[in-house]
Image (tube, rainbow, N blue to C red):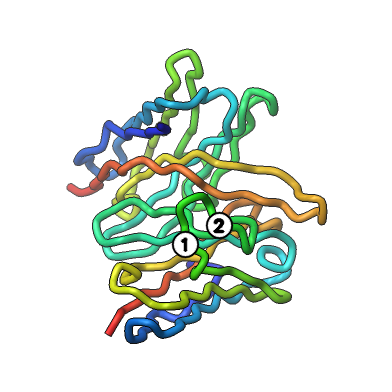
Amino acid sequence: QSVLTQPPSASGTPGQRVTISCSGSSSNIGSNTVNWYQQLPGTAPKLLIYSTNQRPSGVPDRLSGSKSGTSASLALSGLQSEDEADYYCAAWDDSLNGYVFGTGTKVTVL
Amino acid sequence: EVQLAESGGGLVQPGGSLRLSCAASGLTLSDHDMAWVRQAPGKGLEWVGRIRNKANNYPTEYAASVKGRFTISRDDSKNSLYLQMNSLKTEDTAVYYCARGSAYYDSNGYFNYYFDYWGQGTLVTVSS
């Protein structure tokens, strides 16, 4: 059972802005930084955002991350067809002494 | 270029054992925290556990679901990571990924932990 809760799905038309939420607790998001991963069908996850709001080299700046208290969010601006994928938030959990992933959100570009 | 390549997956009966390997290239494994992450068919990602780097003396940590049954080890001379899985259950059926971790405390005291490189995964099926 995931301790980070995400909406199961999100959608938008090309060019729109889509935001994915990630709800946690004081022992994970409230205490540590948040990461976001993208998983295209049949492939390994890819790091999109680390340390809550940092983008690895090659990730476009139309993707951004933020957090407030025990919740975090990922924003996809200027939605493109290649953004269709599953997205997972994740953070270290001090109570579990382990890394926890969100439940995942499937993004559909209409 | 950093590459991670898992191997060793396959079909195993409940109660059996299997050892997965992850061969690393393009990086010096001893410098890095390494981890295993799994994904059951049609399900989300689940952290299995991690082994810290040489500078931290290689401690391991595991998810509650596998603690006592799975063991993570590494052979830095071979640039390889391993996952020994014993007493396998049907619910262990998943694609298993190895991943390179970055772990540090930032100036605000937050713990930063994330995976910047992943292997392609290897499928483990536990079934009679």
* Image side of residue A7 versus residue A73, left or right: left
In the image, A96: left or right of A17?
right
Q: Is residue A88 above or below residue B23?
A: below
Callout 2: 10 Å neighbours few (<14), some, many (20+)? Answer: some
Indicate the position of residue A37 as horizontal and vertical percent values.
46, 60
Badge 1: chain ID: A
Instruction: State the residue lying farthest toward the top.
Output: B77
Residue at 38% across, 34% down? B4
Residue on which the image places disc 2: A55
x 37%, y 30%: residue: B22
Picture coordinates of residue B120, whole percent (x, y):
31, 43
* Chain of the residue that carries numbered disc 2 in the rendered image: A
* N-term-proximal mark, 1 vs 2: 2
Find numbered disc 1 in the image and state the secondary structure of the residue it sits on. loop
- Separation of disc 1 and disc 2 at Cα? 8 Å
| Residue at the disc numbered 1 | A60
Label 1 is placed on what type of residue? Answer: Pro
Residue drawn 42% across and 78% down?
A78
Q: Is residue B35 left or right of residue B55?
A: left
Quadrant containing the N terminus of chain B in the rendered view = top left
Mark nearest the camera among 1 and 2 is 1
- Residue B37: % across, % down: 43, 48
- Could you say which quadrant of the image residue A67 lies in? bottom right
Residue type at mark 2: give it: Arg
Graded by Cα atoms within 10 Å as few (under 14), some (14 to 19) or many (20 or more), the crowding at tag 1 reads few
Query: Residue B87 versus residue B24: which sits nearer the camera?
Result: B24
Whether residue A76 is situated above or below residue B78 in the rendered picture: below
Residue contact between numbered discs 1 and 2, judged by CB atoms under 8 Å:
yes
**Which numbered dot is residue B82?**
none
